[in-house]
Amino acid sequence: MKKLILCLFASLLLATGAQAAGGGVAWDKFPADRVTDVAALQRGAKLFANYCLNCHAAGYLRYNRLQDIGLTDEQIKSNLLFTGGKVGDTMKIALDAKDGKEWFGAAPPDLTLIARSRSAPGQGSGADYVYTYLRTYYRDDTKATGWDNLAFPSVAMPHALWELQGQQRAVYAEEKDPHDASKTVHVFKGFEPITQGTLTPSEYNEAVADLVAFLQWAGEPNQGGRVRLGVWVLIFLAVFTVIAWRLNAAYWKDVK
């Protein structure tokens, strides 16, 4: 597994919805169609196993559930299961919660439900937040880890995907406060690249979308089946309503 050393720095990917949203940028829209794209989910699972599963568990998901996205037990064991465990095991990590709390102040959170639990009114869904979060890291030498994040200001966790994205700095400008002309405000203007990553910007955005799609799917692997069942239930109820209506009319037609 890559970047195990990040466990020495990682704290919380997310704290609370209010903390994540407070002071951050508006969230970008996650391409939700990825959740039904099996190839995207497989790529996301690979990214999760290689870059997230070192410090963050997905303890409510079993490896063999990845069969639902088209992977065989052999593929799971060879490409995603690095602990020597069984494919029927849950996606846990070796980091002990007590050690995490002692080292970081709080144990790195389980990510099984992270994309389904961080929505905020007026901002978007949890998937929108994580999608924005993973794309708005920037270098900041004033922080202990050397990184900060627009979606989660003063984030404790460093950028685990920096080799893919490369390094960038945030560009700010001083502008007059629209509410008080005598004051100025610090306004974010964009990012400026420092070093190129192994992926182009568009490729990195695609990779993050795949990762977030996997996290969204992991929160409810049966979501697709639930939606399909719901459609059939609604169709049945619609047909039954028509039948009941006509039966009722036939029953009462001779009653005065």
Image: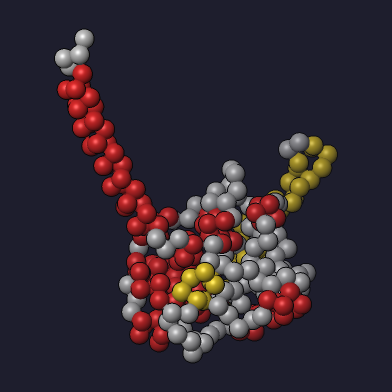
Can you give x and y, in whole percent of width and height, for residue 107 in the image?
Answer: 69, 72
Whether residue 20 is situated above or below residue 111 in the rendered picture: above
Q: Quadrant of the C terminus?
A: top left
Residue 5 appears in which quarter of the rendering? bottom right
Which residue is painted at 79% across and 37% down in the image? Answer: 181
Can you give x and y, in whole percent of width and height, for residue 68 in the image?
Answer: 35, 69
Which residue is painted at 76% across and 47% down in the image? Answer: 185
Furthest residue toward front: 255
Furthest residue toward bottom: 84
Whether residue 240 is situated above or below residue 103 in the rendered picture: above
Residue 160 lies left or right of residue 155; in this view the side is left
Residue 157 appears in which quarter of the rendering? bottom right
- For the question of whether residue 205 can be seen, the reply is no
Which residue is painted at 59% across and 61% down in the image? Answer: 133
Can you give x and y, in whole percent of width and height, for residue 36 in the image?
Answer: 36, 60
Which residue is painted at 82% across and 42% down in the image? Answer: 183
Task: Between residue 171 and residue 94, name the one nearer to us.
Answer: 94
Residue 56 lies left or right of residue 33; in this view the side is right
Task: Between residue 212 and residue 204, name the one nearer to us.
Answer: 212
- The number of numbered discs placed on residues in the rendered structure image is 0
Residue 214 lies left or right of residue 149; in this view the side is left
Can you give x and y, in whole percent of width and height, for residue 244 in the image?
Answer: 24, 30
- For the question of whether residue 14 can be seen, the reply is yes
Task: Between residue 40 and residue 76, name the one nearer to us.
Answer: 76
Task: Between residue 77 and residue 60, name the one nearer to us.
Answer: 60
Whether residue 243 is situated above or below residue 51 in the rendered picture: above
Residue 34 appears in which quarter of the rendering? bottom left
